[in-house]
Every structure is written in C-alpha cells, then in structure tokens.
C-alpha cells in the first residue's frame, strides 16, 4: 500500500468513527429542526441588514447599533438551542481530534516517531512538546 492509499484508508476510518457519525447525525437533526432553520434565516437577514446599513454613504449609527443588538439576540437564541449546543460541542471535539491527527502527520513528516503520540488526543502528550503536555503546544493541538 502506498502513502496515498494509506491516506484514503485513513479517510475511510475517519468517516466510520463514532464521533464523525454522531456529528453527521447532529448536523442533519439541526438541518431538519424548524426552529433552528428559522433562527438561521433571521440571523442571515439581520446580518445583511447590518451590512447594508453600514455600506450606506449616510449611514445611521443608531440603526446599526440596534440591528447589531437584534443580531446578537438571535445568535444567543440559536446558541441556546439544545440541539445546537450538542452539535457545537461535538463539532469542537471532532475538530480537536482532526487537529491532533494533523499534528501527528506533520510531526511524522518532520521525523517524529509515530509511536510517540498518545492515542488519547484529549489528554495527549506527543513527545515533541517541551512542557510534557500538548495544552500549550501550537503544533499538535
């Protein structure tokens, strides 16, 4: 198996991972949720209204402030939605895993030992971090 085939195999493994599957299910649930979709629509319209007002030659700063506040209220309502909370938390966890995976690949391309990386990306130490943990490392995490 060459390196490209191995990478494709990794891609298949990512798509079969429980976290990826959960993220996809949550994304579909959000797409099918009428409340979420309505809030997203309102959010986009409010964002457009703020943009349009800000682009005017004689813009109304008070109106921009009011529109921005309305935009924030809609965003707060969207982020308070339980499905969105679960989606965002899962997305953050998935992104953290992918970032760690990218760090492993980059580290190995730089000559690091692949076995020097922990399987537990949440509490990992890749072996190349001087602090002994990856929390402060900009390379792996």
Image (cartoon, rainbow, N blue to C red):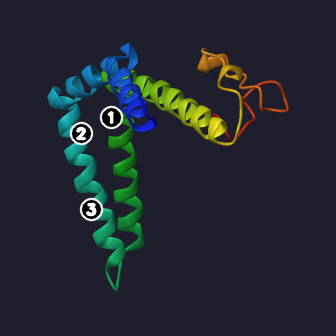
Instruction: Name the spot of residue 77 as percent of width and height, x first.
Output: 34, 34
SS class of the residue under badge 1? Answer: helix
Q: Quadrant of the C terminus?
A: top right
Instruction: Label 2: state its secondary structure.
Output: helix
In this picture, residue 22 sits left or right of residue 103:
left
In whole angstroms, how far apart are the C-alphas of marks 3 and 1?
Answer: 17 Å
Categorize mark 1 by other alpha carbons within 10 Å: few (<14), some (14-19), many (20+): many
Residue placed under numbered mark 2 in the picture: 39
Q: Is residue 85 above or below residue 79?
A: above
Residue 48's label in the rendered image is 3
Which mark, residue 57? none
Q: Distance between the residues labelled 2 and 3?
A: 14 Å
**Of callouts 3 and 1, the N-terminal one:** 3
Q: Residue at x 41, y 27 (%)?
A: 10
Image side of residue 34 versus residue 16, left or right: left
N-term-proximal mark, 2 vs 3: 2
Q: Of residues 116 and 43, which is closer to you in this image?
A: 116
Residue drawn 37% across the image and 32% down it: 5
Assess whether mark 3 and mark 2 are in contact (beta carbons under 8 angstroms).
no
Q: Which residue is drawn at 33% across and 34% down?
A: 78
Dot 1 corresponds to which residue? 78
In percent of width and height, residue 104 lies at: 61, 32
Residue 138 position, x and y percent, is 69, 41
Task: Identify the image quadrant of residue 40.
Answer: top left
Density class for disc 2 (Cα within 10 Å; few <14, some 14-19, many ≥20) is some
Residue with the most extreme bottom position: 57
> Label 2 to label 1, Cα distance in Å?
6 Å
Cβ atoms at labels 2 and 1 below 8 Å apart: yes
Say which of 34 and 71 sits in front.
34
Tell me the SS state at disc 3: helix
Furthest residue to the right? 130
């Amino acid at each position: 198996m060459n390196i490209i085939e191995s990478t494709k195999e990794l891609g298949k493994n990512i798509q079969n991972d429980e976290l990826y599957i959960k993220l996809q299910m949550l994304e579909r649930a959000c797409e099918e949720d009428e409340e979420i979709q309505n809030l997203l629509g309102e959010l986009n319209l409010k964002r457009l209204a703020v943009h349009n007002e800000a682009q005017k030659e004689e813009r109304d700063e008070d109106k921009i402030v009011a529109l921005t506040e309305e935009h924030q209220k809609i965003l707060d309502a969207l982020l308070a939605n339980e499905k969105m909370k679960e989606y965002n938390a899962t997305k953050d966890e998935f992104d953290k895993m992918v970032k760690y995976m990218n760090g492993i690949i980059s580290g190995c391309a730089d000559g690091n030992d692949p076995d020097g990386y922990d399987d537990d990306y949440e509490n990992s130490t890749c072996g190349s971090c001087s602090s002994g943990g990856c929390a402060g490392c900009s390379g792996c995490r």
